[in-house]
Image: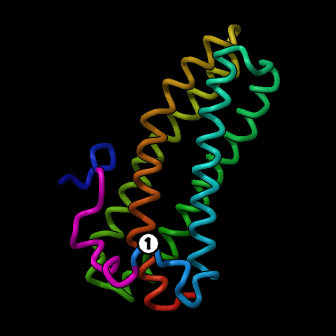
Amino acid sequence: MTDDLAHRDHLPADLVTLLADWPRDRWSDVPGFEGLSSFWLDRHLGFRDLMSGLRLDAEHMSGGRIDPQRWQGRLLRGGEQLVQGLIGHHQVEDASYFPAMVQLEPRLARGFELLDRDHHALDGLLDGFVTAANDALQATDAREAALAFHASLAPFERQLIRHLEDEEDLIIPVILKHQMG
């Protein structure tokens, strides 16, 4: 088992001990779920939806099923939303939520350190995403650009989804246990 986001397929067992008492399939049944827990999951769903939309748009463009100008506009807007949203989300987590949660659950400090390292790894992937998107937007052959952009998304999307799932498995039980809003 590795902590490295690029090679991790789940969190170590010692970091998800709260899931036994707060299993994912019962989160929405917990009083107070509609507060911070629901908000957090909605933000994560938004990031997943943006990634999925960007990937599907690139598939449609490479297959000639979307107009190049429409694809470029959607890539520009969706890409900006994804990048700015993730940067802001991670800044708030690192500066505010993670330190507060470590105070509530000190035994999970290593997990919050792992999530912080994930954020740094995702920063590098975001830089690559921006470069790939800019290359696609400036290319003369939109279909070829869409193929290249689509290929560049796979490692970023896989690691982003892994991070979001791991973050949820660590954080949502803490929020529910301590009724954090």
**Magenta segment, which residues?**
9-22
Residue 40: x, y in percent?
58, 70
Badge 1 density bin: few <14, some 14–19, many ≥20, Cα 10 Å: few
Taking the spot 75% from the left edge, 39% from the top edge, the residue there is 77
Camera-nearest residue between 113 and 18: 18
Quarter holding the N terminus is bottom left
Residue with the mark numbered 1:
24
Residue 111: x, y in percent?
31, 69
For numbered disc 1, what is the local secondary structure? helix
Asked which quadrant contains residue 79, the reply is: top right
Taking the spot 62% from the left edge, 28% from the top edge, the residue there is 133
Instruction: Report if residue 28 lies within the magenta region.
Output: no
Taking the spot 57% from the left edge, 29% from the top edge, the residue there is 131
The correct choice, above or below, for 99 with respect to 141 in the image is below
Camera-nearest residue between 109 and 145: 145
Q: Amino acid at mark 1?
A: Arg
The correct choice, above or below, for 173 with respect to 156 in the image is below
Taking the spot 71% from the left edge, 14% from the top edge, the residue there is 64
Residue 18: x, y in percent?
33, 80
Q: What colouring style does the render use?
A: rainbow
Asked which quadrant contains residue 88, the reply is: bottom right
The correct choice, above or below, for 73 with respect to 113 in the image is above
Q: How many marks?
A: 1
